Each structure stands twice: as C-alpha cells, then as structure tokens.
Image: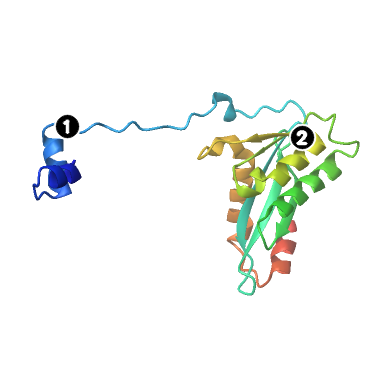
Amino acid sequence: MAWWLRRKENLPLNRKRVLRVMRERGLLVCSRRLWARRRKDWGSVEAAQPNQLWESDMTKIWAGPTVGWAHLVSVIDCYTREIVSWNPSNRCRTGEALDAVKQAVLARLPEGSRDANLTLTTDTGTQFTSTRFIETLNRLGITHRRKAYHHMEGNSYIERFHRSLKEEEVWAAEYRNVQEAWASIGR
C-alpha cells in the first residue's frame, strides 16, 4: 500500500505510517496461522510383548577436550524398557544410526526381523529420514514411524533414558577422552 501511494499518488509516506493508519482504521487482514496437525495416537505407546515396539534417538555427549562432542545412538524396547543396543560415534550420520538398529536386530531377533512385526519410532532427524535409512528398514521388514515435530511424547521412552543417562552419568563425570566416556557409559 505504501509503494502504491508513493508511486501512483506521489505522496511521500513512510511504510510504518501507512501500517499505523491502516491498523487504527481496522483495514488490516489478520493472517491465518497454520498449525501442524498431530495424530492423536502418536502420544500413546502400546506394546503388548517384547520386540514389538522400539524407539531410537541420537544425543550429544561431551567426550573431553581432545574430541569435543561425540554422539550416542540408542535403541530401547518400549515393553521391557531395556536398551537393546547403543552405538557411540564421533559423527552423527545415517551409518551410525543404522549400525545401532542392525546391532539391535542381531541381538534381539536372531531368527530374523521380517516376521517379528516390529515398529521403530524415531524423530525427524536427517539420520532417520534419509533414503538409505528408510530403505534398510524396509529390507529388514521393520515398520518405521516418525514422531511429529515438537512432540516429545511420541518418543518418550528414549528421550527419558537419554535425560537420565546425562543426569546420572555424563554430567557427573568429566571425561578426558572418548574411550573413557564410552567405557563409563557402557558400565
């Protein structure tokens, strides 16, 4: 509107003045806010038996001044609330997330994952949404369920485990190197 008044009507007006006058006279149109819709069943985690529903997530851990930040990918069984596998790494890429899932499948499903009717819930991080990760889960016969943005309840068990791990172990210790960090976390 300010541009039009300056160009077409030759009125030297500031855009802020035009905005103020339009606001005072009720000429502004309220913008429609778009809200992300969440599925109502994403907050509920129902597992009737072990190895039916797993959750996975990645967290950063301070591993000493020589390395800096390191990353930990964990997979938890939602029925037993037991850590199925964990994979420490210096990078946070798809390969590290896949290694944790493959270790979990080998440890918990020796007969194979195709007939296990397993669902893996992750967040929408780039590691878990990559084509390579999704194709590997499809090959393994694992159903992939991603939680909604800013919806912590959708991945609550693994989020709570990472918080407890940091409160009870990581923040209480000062690691000098990566090997010391992973040995202490493994205990």
| Quarter of the figure with residue 91 | bottom right
Q: Position of residue 100 (x, y in %)?
A: 75, 49
Q: Is residue 112 left or right of residue 122?
A: right
Asked whether the residues under the numbered discs 2 and 1 touch, taking CB atoms below 8 Å apart as contact, a structural biologist would say no
- Relative to the observer, which residue lies in front, 135 or 185? 135
Amino acid under label 1? Leu
Distance, label 2 to label 1, CA atoms, is 54 Å
Point 65% across, 69% down: residue: 175
Give the colour scheme shown.
rainbow
Q: Is residue 153 left or right of residue 14?
A: right
Above-or-below relation of 98 to 34? below
Count residues near mark 2 (Cα–Cα under 10 Å), then give few for <14, some for 14-19, many for 20+.
Answer: many
Q: Position of residue 50 (x, y in %)?
A: 78, 32
Q: Which residue is mark 2?
A: 142
Q: Position of residue 83 (x, y in %)?
A: 73, 45
Q: Which mark is residue 27?
A: 1
